[in-house]
């Protein structure tokens, strides 16, 4: 049986072309700096792929690996004040450092991940200058494939990077979805998801969403990134794509997330009159 996969390549190209057009109007090349401390192999791998992506978009890119936790905070303060830097990416988790302490030393105007409490708070008022990139990617994909207004959306996952901000973004008056937020401890999860027009799986649990949990007319956005037997898989079982439209993993939400991360750097450069 053929798979009903959602092709995000046209949306990716649209975002990339917009970025390149906007960059051509800047006086200087925007710069993104990634700050990390005691990175594990997966973090190192991600930073390398991020560096490749930045080069594809024509951005300056730098990785700073701190030798201790104090150096992380000092670097964030310096980068926040450095007018040559437009975006700061902080790898998570950071050993020995409380996340709120990190944010206290990071300017929300350069928080391209949209994780700073200021940026998250502004979402409540409909200001999405820097929304969390993954949540924003989900919204962009949905707006590209369906009409969101009035739809019954079930989000599985309650993180501050996806689930919670995504719910807020979909509830906005100009989107007006009806949103239910579930998680891995939700009782009768299948009964809830079967009544959904749109399902967003962002719980970080491989194969959580099965064919029995989805109706044939649903749109399923798979945010999960899990490694099973050396293979990257999502939170949605492959069988689901036999009856419903599903974003692929890899090559789906992650692809758009990366593009939006780069778009945030350009947006910051524009605000700084680069």
Image (tube, grey):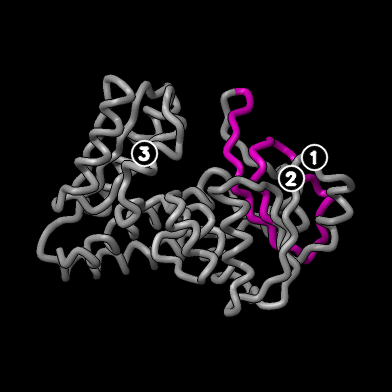
The stretch in magenta equals 200-229
Residues at marks 2 and 1, CA–CA distance in whole angstroms? 5 Å
- At label 1, counting other C-alpha atoms closer than 10 Å, the crowd grade (few under 14, some 14-19, many 20 or more) is few
Q: Main SS type for the magenta part?
A: loop
Please name the residue shown 54% across and 56% down the image. Answer: 135
Residues at marks 2 and 3, CA–CA distance in whole angstroms? 26 Å
Judging depth in this view, the residue of 196 and 35 nearest the camera is 35
Mark 2, secondary structure of its residue: loop
The residue tagged 1 is 185
Q: Residue 108 carries which label?
A: none
The residue tagged 2 is 183
Displayed quadrant of residue 209: top right
Displayed quadrant of residue 200: bottom right
Quadrant of the image containing the C terminus: bottom left
In the image, residue 132 above or below residue 25: above
- Circles 2 and 1: CB distance less than 8 Å? yes
* Residue 242 at x, y percent in the picture: 75, 53
* Residue 216 at x, y percent in the picture: 80, 62
Judging depth in this view, the residue of 24 and 188 nearest the camera is 188
């Amino acid at each position: 049986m053929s798979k009903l996969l959602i092709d995000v390549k046209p949306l990716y190209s649209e975002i990339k072309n917009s970025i390149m057009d906007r960059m051509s109007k800047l006086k200087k090349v925007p710069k993104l700096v990634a700050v990390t401390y005691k990175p594990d192999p997966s973090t190192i791998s991600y930073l390398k792929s991020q560096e490749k992506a930045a080069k594809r978009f024509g951005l300056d890119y730098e990785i700073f690996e701190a030798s201790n936790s104090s150096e992380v905070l000092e670097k964030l303060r310096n980068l926040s004040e450095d007018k040559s830097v437009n975006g700061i990416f902080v790898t998570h988790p950071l050993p020995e450092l409380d996340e709120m302490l990190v944010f206290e030393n990071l300017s929300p105007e350069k928080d391209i991940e949209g994780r700073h409490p200021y940026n998250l708070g502004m979402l409540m008022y409909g200001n999405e200058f820097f929304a969390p990139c993954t949540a924003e990617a989900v919204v962009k994909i949905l707006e590209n494939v369906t009409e969101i207004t009035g739809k019954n959306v079930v989000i599985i996952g309650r993180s501050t990077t996806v689930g919670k901000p995504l719910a807020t973004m979909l509830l906005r008056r100009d989107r007006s979805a009806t949103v239910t937020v579930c998680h891995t401890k939700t009782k009768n999860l299948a009964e809830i998801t079967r009544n959904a027009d749109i399902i967003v799986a962002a719980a970080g649990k491989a194969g959580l969403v099965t064919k029995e949990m989805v109706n044939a007319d649903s749109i399923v956005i798979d945010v999960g990134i899990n490694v099973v037997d050396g293979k990257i898989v999502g939170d949605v079982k492959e069988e689901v794509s036999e009856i419903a439209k599903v974003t692929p993993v890899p090559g789906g939400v992650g692809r758009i997330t990366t593009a939006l991360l780069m778009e945030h750097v350009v947006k910051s450069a524009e605000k700084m009159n680069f």
